[in-house]
Amino acid sequence: GDSVTQMEGPVTLSEEACLTINCTYTATGYPSLFWYVQYPGEGLQLLLKATKADDKGSNKGFEATYRKETTSFHLEKGSVQVSDSAVYFCALTSTSGTYKYIFGTGTRLKVLA
Amino acid sequence: GAGVSQSPSNKVTEKGKDVELRCDPISGHTALYWYRQSLGQGLEFLIYFQGNSAPDKSGLPSDRFSAERTGGSVSTLTIQRTQQEDSAVYLCASSFGGEKLFFGSGTQLSVL
């Protein structure tokens, strides 16, 4: 079945460092891909998405490119801030004919001032 | 309200008791999802509703778990004979058209 694998955390970075959180997926069709973020004490919210190969999703300085050839959707940011500290979840919509969302296990990011 | 509402926000129960968790989705959202978030386990899919029907209930861990949705709106997740391993945060989300999910704040369930 469809699945998502993302790098384990926690990831600890200094402010202004570069960030990459790896995400790869397994799917038989052409899923849409997402990154959701959960800030401390808040609910999950959509960060960015891409719906087809080579699409780039971007928001709040974060970017991710839908790479079908490597089945990846890595999250990147050039300069992180303390306020980016959160748990990041990679997700896809199932290709099984329903709108079932499948999430990765989440990666906790901690940014130090 | 404007967002997805879940109640109660916290529930402490004794092992063997039944619990009901409620989710009020955003008005007009046809799809509703239940997930379980355990410490260090990420989001575990439980069940998905389209309208009042559940095309995919493959994630329900056992027959102690059931869910229903009425009027294409409110959903209730019921856990019978709770066990300690059921302790987790139960998240509800809704969407329209299968794209962006809107999550509630969750119900923290603690089984003693």
Image (cartoon, coloured by chain):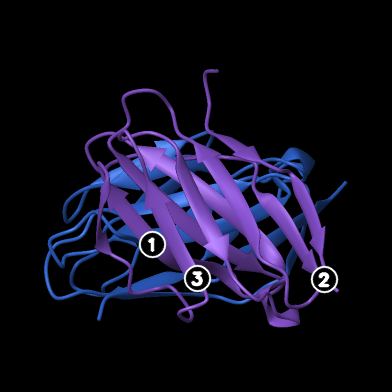
Rendering coords of residue A49 (x, y %): 34, 45
Q: Which mark is residue B65?
A: 3
- Contact between marks 2 and 3 (CB within 8 A): the answer is no
| Nearer-the-camera pick, A69 or B67 | B67
Chain ID for purple: B
Q: Residue at x 12, y 61 (%)?
A: A97
Q: Which disc number belongs to residue B14?
A: 2
Q: Name the foreground residue: B95 vs B24.
A: B24
The numbered dot on residue B47 is 1
Q: Which of the image's four quarters has the N terminus of chain A? A: bottom left
Total label count?
3
Q: What is the chain identity of the residue bearing mark 2? A: B
- The structure residue drawn at horizontal position 45% and vertical position 33%, both measured from the top left corner, is B25
Whether residue A77 is visible, yes or no, is: no
Give me the C-alpha separation between circle 2 and circle 1: 24 Å
Q: Which chain is blue?
A: A
Contact (Cβ within 8 Å) of mark 3 with mark 1? no
Asked whether the residues under marks 2 and 3 belong to the same chain, the reply is: yes
N-terminal of the two: label 2 or label 3? 2
- Left or right position of B4 against B32: right
Q: What amino acid is labelled 3 in the image?
A: Phe
